[in-house]
Image (tube, grey):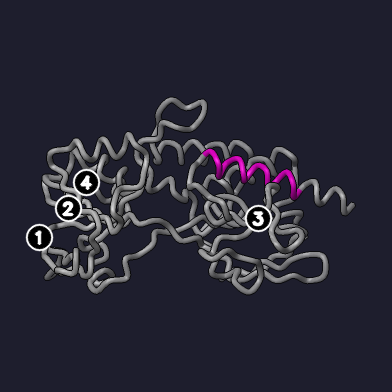
Amino acid sequence: MHETIIIGGGIAGDTAAIYAARKKMDFLMIAKELGGQFFESGEITNYPGIVKTDGENFSESFEDQLEANGIEPRTGEEVTKLEKTGESFKVVTDKGTYETATVIIATGSRPRKLEVPGEDEFAKKGVTYCSVCDGPLFSGKDVVIAGGGNSALEAVDFMREIAEKITLVNNAEQLNGHEYLIDKAESLEKTEIINSAEIVSIEGDKMVNAVRLKKDGQESKIETEGVIIEIGRKPNTDFLKDFLELDEKGHIKIDCQGRTSVEGVFAAGDCASGQEFQYVIAAGQGCMALLKAARYLARRK
């Protein structure tokens, strides 16, 4: 019987694990993989105390801190189900079952899809959801970026020195992101912004070579060698649908203390409600969830 099991290996889960180790709790950290959104982040300049870093270096720093605290995450293991058994819980994975008094869920989120013809067919053949990961593959090429929020605008900024031409396709009437990112995108001569338009299909032979758009009821074709899809994220909470209360978008409903609809279960980070997809928020919520879980255990004793 563990005191707590932390599910997830992004910044929220990492933070919770670090605090659990410092409190000398009996805990497990289970993660399909370490890193979370670190894999998708380029330049990071808004984390307090760090002037400038990037996703790779930030991830390495957290892994070093886990190791320094003697934390050995169970990676390559995916949680498939949670069960309440009396006053404790069973965490069921694809490799085993573990018992715990409390649970902290920090499973993060994944990219949303366009759900159009050709998207799955050309995945990793010109279609990507991560400009930082795959952007360099399109060096000197024309790319289409789908989206109109911060993630899409950050992709434009990342690709400005890499791509030959960038076409930003936004299904809303105007861009919706930080003003400085909008100003950057609109000032780039190599960038064309098409608002109130949607991608209806992705085409190609062995690799992507075009997308079809619909704007004002009319379809058109844009030749491109890459499609970067940045239209938001979906929380990794499918395994919780019959266990916890979720909001309309699938995020776990939590209160200001990270408590969920089931007593003894806490949530933090991008999988939780009210998320703004910021590292500093996820870290704070991971800390809060662990401290409240420890307080909950102390009251029970």
Give the side of residue 250 with respect to residue 163, left or right: right
Residue 289, x across and y down, in percent: 68, 48
Residue type (three-letter) at the residue carrying disc 4? Pro
Q: Are marks 4 and 3 in contact (CB under 8 Å)?
A: no
Residue type (three-letter) at the residue carrying disc 3? Ile
SS label for mark 4: helix
SS label for mark 1: strand
Q: Earlier in the sequence, mark 2 or mark 3?
A: 2
Residue 7, x across and y down, in percent: 60, 57
Residue 143: mark: 2
Does the magenta portion include 298? no
Q: Earlier in the sequence, mark 1 or mark 2?
A: 2
Question: Label 2 crowding class (10 Å Cα cut-off): few <14, some 14-19, many 20+?
Answer: many
Most distant residue in the right direction: 301
Q: Which residues are magenta?
A: 280-293
For disc 3, the marked residue is 254
For disc 1, the marked residue is 223
